[in-house]
Amino acid sequence: MQTDLIQRLPKAELHLHIEGSFEPELMMALAERNRITLPFKTLEDARAAYNFSNLQEFLDLYYQGMQVLRTEEDFFDLTWAYLQRAEADNVRHVEMFYDPQAHTERGVPFGVVTDGILAAIKKGEQELGISSYLIMSFLRHLSEEDGFDLLVQSEPWHDKFIGVGLDSSEMGHPPLKFERLYQRCRELGFKLCMHAGEEGPPSYVREALLDIGVDRIDHGNRCMEDPELVSMIREMQIPLTNCPLSNLSLCVIDDLKQSPVKAQLEAGLLVTVNSDDPAYFGGYIGRNYEQTAAALGLSDQQLIQLARNSFTASFLPEANKQRHLAAIETAA
Ligand SMILES: [Zn+2]
């Protein structure tokens, strides 16, 4: 049974927005704790709202839900809930994005957000044995100047981040808009991630790869429209963090059979499977593997390759990668 194999395989999750793991139950509980009124009265109303047809509709709900996150304890609870869920899917390492600007712009201090997440990460390492790296993301619908402000504001925590990311509305906000900011982040020693080619054209992936010099491309679906670009990504072995159920929810694809994961594996690309915003897109990482395998007819060997890729594409030190890869051999 492939479900058993998927469960057994140790996995890393490399494309996860911690705010996107906000389940309606927890959202309603925190709304009550913080005495905030949500536009939905019942859990059913909330679940019904978790239904959208494109990136912008999703983002509107995503930012609305975040309003109830106010205290360090809220951010701790959010992160801890995700880590427990990840453990159930045998995730052994996580590199999670978070969006500080979405919180600071509504008056929640940077430290409240970051320290709450970090406390849960520490507990996850101690009690679940899951290692986690934090990736600070810039909101691309804001200006590069806003990004520089965040970089300054976050200075006391710089040793707590492995890298930076770029997310939110992609269309009209190409990678080059943030060229100077990313140059600075490179100088500061951060790993560079960037969402590109989810809705945006292949030229955005090219910019991220060649002009920005990213270490990892998030999504990257539309690189497949440009064979020369595919060759470059293969030769450079730049990882792609694909998110199949997210692609389906946001209508990047109409059917999971259109997911590029299999074609990317067969083209020799370092592709990984991830959940993106699992509370909103109908599944955590295990379900992403299962549904993708079923839709594309992935072989056991291809599933093992995806698990291997998740660690190879991570920012873990080489010795840790080897330890996880050895565990995959044992589990397979
Ligand atoms: Zn994402």
Image (cartoon, grey):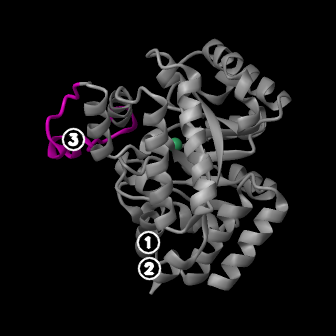
Which residue, given by chain and number where applicable, does mark 3 sit on? 46
Task: Look at label 3 and name its amino acid.
Answer: Ala
Is the residue under label 3 in contact with that under label 2 (CB below 8 Å)? no
Secondary element at image label 2: helix
State left or right for residue 331 relative to residue 71: right
- Judge from the rendering whether residue 245 lies leftward or rightward of residue 195; answer left or right: left
Which secondary structure lies at badge 1? helix
Name which residue type carries label 2: Thr
Q: Which residues are magenta?
A: 37-57
Residue 67 appears left or right of 84: left
Q: Residue at x 57, y 22 (%)?
A: 110
Cβ(mark 3) to ligand 1 < 8 Å?
no
- For residue 227, side relative to residue 277 (left or right): right
> Could you tell which of marks 2 and 3 lies nearer the N-terminus?
2
- Along the polypeptide, which appears first: circle 1 or circle 2? 2
Secondary structure of residue under mark 3: helix
Label 1: how many Cα within 10 Å (few below 14, some 14–19, many 20+): some
Mark in front: 3 vs 1: 3
The residue labelled by disc 1 is 290
Instruction: Give the residue type at disc 1.
Output: Glu
Snapshot quadrant of residue 322: bottom right
Position of 141 relative to 51 (above/below): above
**Which residue, given by chain and number where applicable, does mark 2 sit on?**
3
Residue 39 lies within the magenta run = yes
Could you tell me how many numbered marks the image carries? 3
- Badges 1 and 2: C-beta atoms under 8 Å apart? yes
